[in-house]
Image (spheres, rainbow, N blue to C red):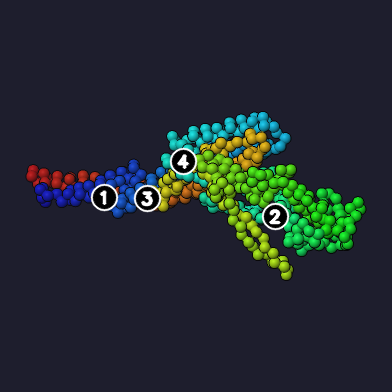
Amino acid sequence: MVVQHNMQAANASRTLNITTDSQSKSTEKLSSGYKINRAADDAAGLSISEKMRKQIRGLTQASTNASDGVSSVQTAEGALTEVHDMLQRMNELAVQAANGTNSESDRDDIQNEISQLTQEIDRIASTTKFNETFLLKGDIGLKKMYISAHDAGLEGTLVQNTTRATFTMESLEAGEKYTIGGTQYTIGAKTKEEAAKALHLEDKHDENNEGKESEWSLTAGDTISIDGKTYTIVDGSTSDVANSKVTNGYLNNLIVAGSTLKYNGNEVTMFAQLATDGSGIDKANATLITASAAYNMVAIELKAASSVGATDGAADVDKSGDAYTWKERTVQQTNGVDTTDTKTISFSITKGFVNVQNALTLNLHVGADAAMSNKINVNIEAMNSKSIGINGLNVSDATGKAATYAIDAIADAIQRVSAQRAELGAIQNRLEHSIKNLDNVVENTEAAESRIRDTDMADQMVEYSKNNILQQAGQSMLAQANQATQGVMNLLQ
C-alpha cells in the first residue's frame, strides 16, 4: 500500500479527463450545429467545405446579379414598348398625310404631331435609366449607321448590302408606261422607226424610205388607229379618207409629230416637240417623256426615298458630271424558237448615314468563378430618333410624296425597335434560365456542404448521452479511488 502514487485515482482521473474533453466537444457540436468548429475537428473536411462555401456564396450572388440584369432588361424593354406605340401612331399619321385629299395645311397639322412624338421618343431615350445607368442613350463614342435604301414604290428590284444598294429595272422603250412618284409617264417615240418598233411593225416599215410612199407596207385589210380614228389599209394608190380607207403611202400624211398610234393592242405616241432644255419632256404633254428623262426621274426618286432620316449624309445615286448614269445589262431570254434581248437598267445607290452613339454593353457576371464564360453581354443600341432613322421626318410637302417615303422610314424604325426588343426578350429568357440553374447548383452544393459540416443531432445526442454517463461514472470511480488511501491512516494509528 503506497501513498505517493495512487494509480487507481490517476487512471480514473485520466479517463475522466478524456471523457470530459469528449463531452465538451459534443456540447460544442450540439450547441453550434456544426460538427467542424475548428480545423482540428476535420482538417480535410474543413478545406472541402470552405471551397463549397465559396462556390455557394458566389453562386448566390451570381443569381442576384442575374435577377438585377432581368430588372434592367425589363426596364429598357418597357420603355421601348412606348416607343413602339408612338412609331405605330406615326405610321398612321404618315399614311394619312400621304392621301391626296389632304391640303398642305392639313399636312402641317399632321407634322406637328409627328414632331411631338419624335421629341418624346428622344426624351424617353435620354432619360430611361436603371440604377443611374442610362439604358437607351448608347455609350461613349460615335459610329456611322447607314440608312436602308428604298425603291420609292418603283417597279423593279432593290438589293442592298451594308453601304450600297442597287435598283434594277427593265429598260423603257417607246410606247411603254412607267409610274414615277405617283404619276404615270409614257415613253414617246422620236421617229417613225421607234413608233413602228413599239407597234411591232419593224418588218412593215422601212427606215431608209422614211417620208416616201414606200415607207409603210402594212397588209391590206389591217387596221391602225391614228389619233383616235381607225383606218383600214387598202391596195392601190387611191385612199378613201372619208370612209377611213387609206393606202400605205397615205399613212405619211396621217402619222405626224404628236400622233398617237394603236395597232394590234399596242400603243405609242410620237413627240410633238421636245423641250429645248434637255429635260426630255414633250412641251404639249408633260407626261410624255424620253427613256433618259424617265431614268433621271427614277434616280431622283430613289435618292429622295433613300435619304429620309439620313441627316448626316444623304443617299446618292452615282453621277457623272451633272447627269445621272446607269449601267445596261443584256439578258438572253429564250421563248420557244425565238430569242430576244431584254435590257435592264441598274442604279447604284450610296446609302445615306447618321452618326450615332455606340451601343451600351452590360456585362452580367452570372458565375462564382472569374471565367469570362460566366459573362452574359447585354447590348442595347441607342434608341433616339436619329438612331432609328426618323430624325427630321417630314410629311408636310404639297404633293404627299414625302409622307409616302416617310412610311418606309417609319417601317424601318419599327423593325429596328422590334429587333432590339426581341434581343432583350431573348436575353431575359436566358437570364431566367441562368437563375434557375444557379439556384439548383446552390441547393445541391449546400446539401453536400451540409453533409460535411453540419452536426447530425441524433448521432451526436447518443454520443453526448454516452459521455455524460461515463463522466458521472468516472467521477464516482475517482472518488472511490481517492478513498482507497484512507486505509493508511488505520495502519498509522
Instruction: Choose the circle earlier in sequence order: 4 or 3.
Output: 4
Q: Which residue is mark 3?
A: 369
Residue wearing tag 1: 40
Residue 357 is labelled as 4
- Please tell me whether mark 3 sits on a helix, a strand or a loop: loop
- How many numbered marks appear? 4
- Frontmost residue, 463 versus 50: 50
Gap between marks 2 and 3 measured at Cα: 71 Å
Secondary structure beneath label 2: loop
Rendered location of residue 408, percent (x, y): 62, 43
Residue 76 appears in the figure: no
Q: Disc 2 residue type?
A: Glu
Residue to which mark 2 is pinned: 173
Query: If you read the primary sequence from the N terminus, does the residue marked by circle 2 or circle 1 appear first?
Result: 1
Residue 60 shown left or right of residue 296 in the figure: left
Judge depth for marks 2 and 1 and give the one in front: 2
Of the two numbered discs 1 and 3 on the same chain, state the one appearing first in sequence.
Answer: 1
For disc 3, the neighbor class at 10 Å (few under 14, some 14 to 19, many from 20) is some
